Each structure stands twice: as structure tokens, then as C-alpha cells.
Image: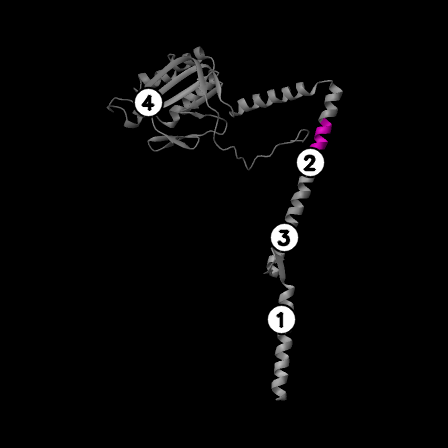
Amino acid sequence: MKGKRGRAFLIFVFALLFGLLLQSQMGVSGGQKLYVSAKTLDYYNTNLETERRETEALKLQVEAARAKLDELEATLAESGESYDAYVADLQSQIAYASELAGQTDLRGPGVKIVIDDSTGEATTWDVNDLLVHDQDLLTIVNDLKTAGAEAISINGQRLVGSSAISCSGYTVRINGVVYATPFVILAIGDSARMAETMLGPTGYGTLLTEVYGLQFRLSVENEIVIPAYRGSRYCPHLTVVKEGTEL
């Protein structure tokens, strides 16, 4: 009997200790006790630490912004320029930079070019000579730029510094989008100069029509609307060089 009582007593003590341990790991939520594991506590602690660091970073950004604002206000006070005039000047610079970067829709006089494959049959020429290729579009774009084109689009794709025109089978890829003929090229600028460059005796438009038989039509327009560039501007390898840095 003594042995059985001893075992019973040990079981009782073990159960009591287990209950106390379980109770220490309990939390209260909405009047109900919920078990909270050590892993969950670590997770919450990590999140709290992350939020604390982000809060500190935001505070530093606010302080930097306030310091920059104080600096601008001091500069304005020294120059005597009003705040409204300073903001208007900044907005004007931003608008001009956006135009140059292709970020805004533009309108103005210029030319409209429609180029398509030849409707003739290949005789002495290779059949590829009767088709519009990426190099044809590139040549036209370059000639338009030489003639002073200020903005150019092909089939609605605004051409910017990062634009690419490449062959993709019987189609052409422009800004990553595939297009088939016909190609509609819009260019804002000196329409008379651009038309002369394209249709003059040595113009590329003249070469395409008279030598290769491609369809090439150019019209002078009083107003052309060229859309903004809608593609990605992600440039992971670029770093802005700060003023005063030795190159």
C-alpha cells in the first residue's frame, strides 16, 4: 500500500506542477484564456521591434524634411522671393523635365507617317525587301530627329531614351510591345523640314517607295497629340551623382 500511495503522491505532484506551468503560458482575451506559445511570443516581440525601428526611421525622415523646409525658408528670406513664386518656378521646372522625359502627353504641329509592306510581288528582289523591318523604323526615327523632331511615337508608343525597336519575326517590338504593319509614326516639330527630309530626292521615304515599293505616306498636320510614355522607369543600376562630387 505504501508503494501505491507513494506513486499516487508523485503523480499528484507532477500534475500540480504541469498545471502551474500551463497556467503560466495562458493569456486572457475577451474573457477567454488562450494558450500562448514561446514561439508566438518571439514573433510578437520581433514585430514590435520592427515597428519600433520603422517609427524611428520615420521620425528621422520628418526631422530631415523639417530641416530642409527651414533651409528653403531661409533661402527665400535672403533672396526676397515669395513662396508662391518659388513654388511656381519649381512646378515649371518639373513640368519641363516631365516633357523631356516623356512623362506627359504633348500636342503640336508636325507630320504623320504611315508605312506598310509592299503590295507587289517579289521578282528580282528578295521577298524580305518588300516588308517593313525594324531597321526601317529606326532609320525614319533617326532622320526625323535629325530634322528637329521634338517628340515621336510609333503606334501610340512614345519613344524615350530607354526605348527599343527590334525585329520579332514578321512583327516589330516597340517598348516591349509587339506590333504588325501598318506602322503609324507621329512626330511633333518643324513639319516642313521633316517632310523635306523624308520625301526629298535622297530621303528615306523616297527610297522605300521608289526602290523597294513599300507603302509610305506622309501628311503635314496642324496638330498632333503624342501620348506619354507608359512603360517602366525602373533603373536599378543608376545612381545620382551629388553636386560637387569629383568625377
Camera-side mark, 1 or 3: 1
**Local crowd size for mark 1, using a 10 Å CA cut-off: few (<14), some (14–19), many (≥20):** few
Real-space CA distance between mark 3 and mark 4, rounded to the nearest whole angstrom: 62 Å
Real-space CA distance between mark 2 and mark 4, rounded to the nearest whole angstrom: 57 Å
Real-space CA distance between mark 2 and mark 3, rounded to the nearest whole angstrom: 24 Å
Residue 7 to residue 38: above or below: below
Q: Which residue is mark 1?
A: 18
Query: In the image, which disc is placed on residue 62?
Result: 2
Q: Which residue is mark 4?
A: 116
**Residue at image coords 41%, 13%:** 221
Say what amino acid the circle numbered 4 marks.
Answer: Asp
Magenta-span inclusion, residue 139: no
Region rendered in magenta: 62-71
Say what amino acid the circle numbered 2 marks.
Answer: Val
Q: Position of residue 136 (x, y in %)?
A: 38, 24
Say whether residue 35 is visible. no
Magenta-span inclusion, residue 67: yes
Q: Position of residue 217 (x, y in %)?
A: 35, 16
Real-space CA distance between mark 2 and mark 1, rounded to the nearest whole angstrom: 51 Å
Residue 19 to residue 132: above or below: below
Query: In the image, which disc is placed on residue 46?
Result: 3
Real-space CA distance between mark 1 and mark 3, rounded to the nearest whole angstrom: 28 Å
Camera-side mark, 2 or 4: 2
Q: Magenta region's main secondary structure?
A: helix
**Residue at image coords 67%, 37%:** 61
Whichever of labels 3 and 4 marks the residue nearer the N terminus, that label is 3
